[in-house]
Amino acid sequence: MKSRNYFVLKSFSASFLARVIGLLTLIFITPLLLKYFGKEKFGIWSIIIGIVSYLSFADLGLSNGLLNYLIKNKEDKKKRQESIKSTFIFLSVISLIIFGVLSVFIVFVDWNQLLNTDILEVSPIVFIATFFFVLNIPFSIIQKVQFAFLNNYIFHFWELFQKLITFIALFILVKIKADFKWFVVAFFAPYIVSNLLNIVFYSLSWPERFSFKMMFSKNVSFAFKILKNIFFTGSQFLLMNIAYLFGRSFDKIILASLSSPLEVTNYEVLLKPFELSNVFIMMLSTTLWPAFGDAIEKKDKIWIFSVLKKSLIIVGLSFFVVIGSMLLFGNEILLIWLKFENNFNKISFIIVGLLMMVLSMFNVLSSYLNAANYLKFQIIIFSAYAIISIGAKILGYKIFGLNGFIFFNLIVFLFLVFLPSLIKIKKDL
């Protein structure tokens, strides 16, 4: 338990530093981009980043399947090495196939019509973003390997490097008044660079865990049976992520189709102050997944219950402070920080704050659910949420505008995802 607590503290500290840099980047770069792009282009920027984030399921869930497999088998050298090599090779092939398919899709979709804009040509921008994201897929498994060995702090060090490079690149591009496409390159390319450098560093430091030599060694086989095991778990993660994708991640596209990119900008600006708090919550959840996995293997339910309870309390209190601050000074904060003048009412701040609080608290719960392999359960609740929430959000927007869109989303997520998960875990512990 002491080593696990030390891991959580060490990992959280490293993640904290990386997230602080990310937070500072968000604070300083967002108003610069908003001013440089203008409201409509900034809305398109937000949509493109959101669209590419939808591709998180493109690895077919294998990276998460690998993490759970390594947590259980990391002491078995043969299984460990074969699982990493097999997953890396398979993801490399899949990435090429997915990029080919998506390239055709991007060419034949009229993105300008889809986003209700004619301010710039969107298709090439989406293509560039997709290229860099898909290219990074096989290299991103280094994160899962390090998490399985409770070396999260190493990944977070390179995450810090990635955020610094992104900040510097975007800042320079604003100053030299670069074309829109270069901002997309500057945002996505550092992910690949940091992962490659991380792999080189980890290969030199812990070659028995992960190395390029291991990838090409004849002594390490491509293990179809192990890959099949990982793929089975990964396919459940894939279905779970797709269901969550349809329920949560299409918000900006739905808003753009119902109104325009300007409404997306209003939504994005409303979320920004609460996303600052969520940055630190995400640190906690990514740290807890492998720690919960270790505790489950050792049947340490007391530790799990204690950590879950404390984490949920911390999240709740953090968001109540942020919501209170936004109720008092919300529009002033947005005006000073983002130079964005739009008098949002207090109801907007309350609804968005509660939505982000519930989502953040669920991130903590999902860390346990993922570690415990409760994937079918999550597929069911996310599917129900996806089916009902899209219609509910559209209805809410047509009746009450943006506030209705957010409120209906909150209610559906609370009753179909958060509360069932809380009940499930309570019964387990």
Image (cartoon, grey):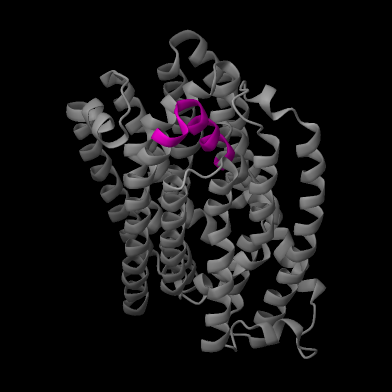
Is residue 25 a member of the stretch shown in magenta?
no
Q: Relative to 228, does residue 217 appear above or below in the rendering? A: below
Is residue 101 toward the left or the right of residue 400 in the image?
A: right
Front residue of this view, candidates 209 and 69: 209
Q: Is residue 418 above or below residue 100?
A: above
Where residue 127 appears, x then y in whole percent? 70, 44
Residue 424, position as x, y percentages in the image: 48, 46
Q: Is residue 372 visible?
A: no
User: Which secondary structure type mostly characterizes the magenta part of the structure?
Assistant: helix
Question: Image point 60% across, 73% down: which residue?
Answer: 70
| Position of residue 280 measured from the top left corner of the image (x, y, whole percent) | 34, 53
* Figure quadrant of the N terminus: bottom left
Residue 296 vertical position relative to residue 40 in the rendered view, above or below: below
Find residue 259 and report its image quarter: top right
The magenta stretch is: 35-49
Question: Dividing the image into 4 quarters, which one contains the C terminus?
Answer: bottom left
